[in-house]
Amino acid sequence: MRARIPLSFTLITLLLACDDRPAALAPEGASADYSLVSASATTASEIAQLRQLVAPFHDFDVAVAAGWSVQITPCLEAPGLGAMGFHYGKLAFIGDGGTVELLQPELLLYEPQKNGTLRFVGVEYIVPFADHPATEAPPTLLGQEFAQVPAFGVWGLHIWVGRENRSGIFSPWNPKVTCEHAGLQGVTAGHSHGR
């Protein structure tokens, strides 16, 4: 008996494997994000929607114009684990009472480049402890549990949709990201995620 593969999963796999648009679906020219290989067809489809949403934000000025204009953190880095980069927030989403919407990430992550520009690398969803206490079960998105970030009083979940992460698309730190070119911006590793 042959196993049947759902048509939607096949189409999404083909879309991810064949798409040649730079950074829109497969960052850095990769043919597919291998960290999604075991993901459900629904999750892969939702990640593709998120990538389409953030595609314009590879241009930092476009992200600022769209409301992600407040620098929330300096460039964050953890020796041996990688970095997250700068976190830029959209205050309307941060102050929404703890609502988690895939296409409304509270934070966009940017890696400082040698030439002084910022490279989009991913998103982070946050839910303040004031809206969802640390004593409760963690919020979830795409079947992933948020981690506590006590230093900032929030729950957090990263999705690396701008730069591939060999540690996993939902990992808090990305070994490919660096704060090497952050200048005197105050690099810190205080953004611990308990993972």
Image (cartoon, grey):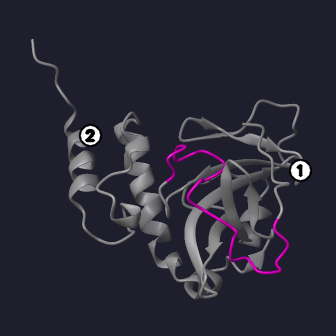
Q: Is residue 185 magenta?
A: yes
Q: Residue visible at 51% across and 51% down?
A: 165
Classify mark 2: helix, strand or loop.
Answer: helix
Residue wearing tag 1: 153
Q: Give the CA distance from mark 2 to mark 1.
A: 38 Å
Please identify the dominant SS of the magenta region: loop
Q: Residue visible at 36% across and 60% down?
A: 26
The number of callouts visible is 2
The outermost residue toward the left is 1
Q: Is residue 95 magenta?
A: no
- Tell me which corner region of the image, top left, top right, bottom left or bottom right, holds residue 183: bottom right
Instruction: Give the image location of residue 75, x and y in percent.
Output: 75, 68
- Within 10 angstroms of label 1, few (less than 14), some, or many (20 or more) residues? some
Q: Amino acid at mark 2?
A: Phe
Check the image and report above or below for 148 versus 21: above
**Where's the N terminus, which quadrant?**
top left
Instruction: Give the image location of residue 129, x and y in percent.
Output: 87, 46
The outermost residue toward the top is 1
Q: Nearer the viewer, residue 164 or 56?
A: 164
Instruction: Give the image location of residue 48, x and y in percent.
Output: 39, 56
Q: Nearer the viewer, residue 126 or 29?
A: 29
Instruction: Give the image location of residue 118, x and y in percent.
Output: 61, 80
Residue wearing tag 2: 9
**Mark 2 or mark 1, earlier in chain:** 2
- Within 10 angstroms of label 2, few (less than 14), some, or many (20 or more) residues? some
Check the image and report above or below for 172 versus 177: above
